[in-house]
Every structure is written in C-alpha cells, then in structure tokens.
Amino acid sequence: MFKAISLASLVLALAGCAVGTGPNDGAVSGEVQAQVPLKAAYDAAVAQAQRCLVGQGGYRVEGQLNETTAVMRVLPPFGSNEMARVEIKSTGPQSSTAHINMWGRSIWNSDAVRAMKDAITYGLPSCVAYMPGSPQPKEEVWKLPRPR
C-alpha cells in the first residue's frame, strides 16, 4: 500500500513538471502591434493575466519592465514552467509590439491569445475576445444563398 501511494505521488509530481510553453507542448502564439506606449501595454498584459490566466490553482504573475522592453509571465505554484509569456518591445513613444505565447491547453489557449491581443490593443482586460477575428471566414455564412 505504501509503495502504491509513493509511486502515485511520484507520477503526479513528474506530471506536474511536464507543463508549460515548450516547443513541443502544443503552445499557441500570436503577435500584436498596438498604438499604445510600452508601459500601457505591459499594464494591460498584467491586468489581463491577473484577471483571466491565474485560474484557481495558485498560479502567479511575474513581470519585468524597463525603458524599451517588458516581459510578463504566468507561472505555476511550484516550478518555473511558463503557462503564458508576453514579451513587449517599444517601437516608438506611442507604439509597441508584443509577442504572446500560451501553453495551448485549458485557460491558456488560442482564445486567451486573442483576448490578450485585445487587452493590449484596447487597454481593457477581458477573458473573452469580443472583436472580430482575423482572418475572416472564407465562407460567408451570414448571407442568404442566392436562388437558382
């Protein structure tokens, strides 16, 4: 019985280490160029992460901001594997570009990437992206078919 509990604990511990935004982990990413200063983009990314990306499992938000770059990361309670990472670079006094990388599972998915893009662009954190996505669908499902 003790061996089974020890083995189960070891398996769970190792499984907990196998998460994050590594290259073969199914990570999703995106880029956004926004007409907002670096600090505003960073503040929006942090607010978005705190509102939508920490879940209820004790995940934490860490970040660094300097004059030309900023990095925001969402980390698990134990360990340093990144669940989400946003790297922001200043491209001018009122503009910046951000690279967003998410784990690709659970709340860190492609919807979260879109929501992060919108949060940085519009300065309004929301867990759902309300703006129309790009590219537009090839099939125009909202139009009625032409009669034959």
Image (cartoon, rainbow, N blue to C red):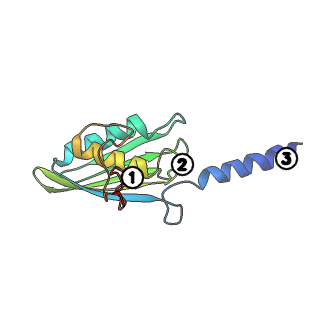
Label 1, secondary structure: give it. Answer: strand
Label 2, secondary structure: give it. Answer: loop
The mark that comes first in sequence, 1 or 2, is 2
Q: Are marks 3 and 1 in contact (CB under 8 Å)?
A: no
Q: Are marks 1 and 2 in contact (CB under 8 Å)?
A: no
Label 3, secondary structure: give it. Answer: helix
Q: Residue 4: give its label.
A: 3
**Front: mark 3 or 1:** 1
The residue depicted at 54 percent of the width and 61 percent of the height is 25
Query: Which residue is disc 1 drawn over?
Result: 85
Task: Categorize mark 3 by other alpha carbons within 10 Å: few (<14), some (14-19), many (20+).
Answer: few
Query: Which residue is disc 2 drawn over?
Result: 79
- In the image as oriented, which residue stretches furthest toward the bottom? 24
Q: Give me the C-alpha separation between circle 3 and circle 2.
A: 25 Å
The mark that comes first in sequence, 3 or 1, is 3
- In the image as oriented, which residue stretches furthest toward the right? 1
The residue depicted at 87 percent of the width and 43 percent of the height is 2
Q: Give me the C-alpha separation between circle 1 and circle 2.
A: 15 Å
Residue type, label 2 = Gly
The one nearer the camera, 78 or 138, is 138
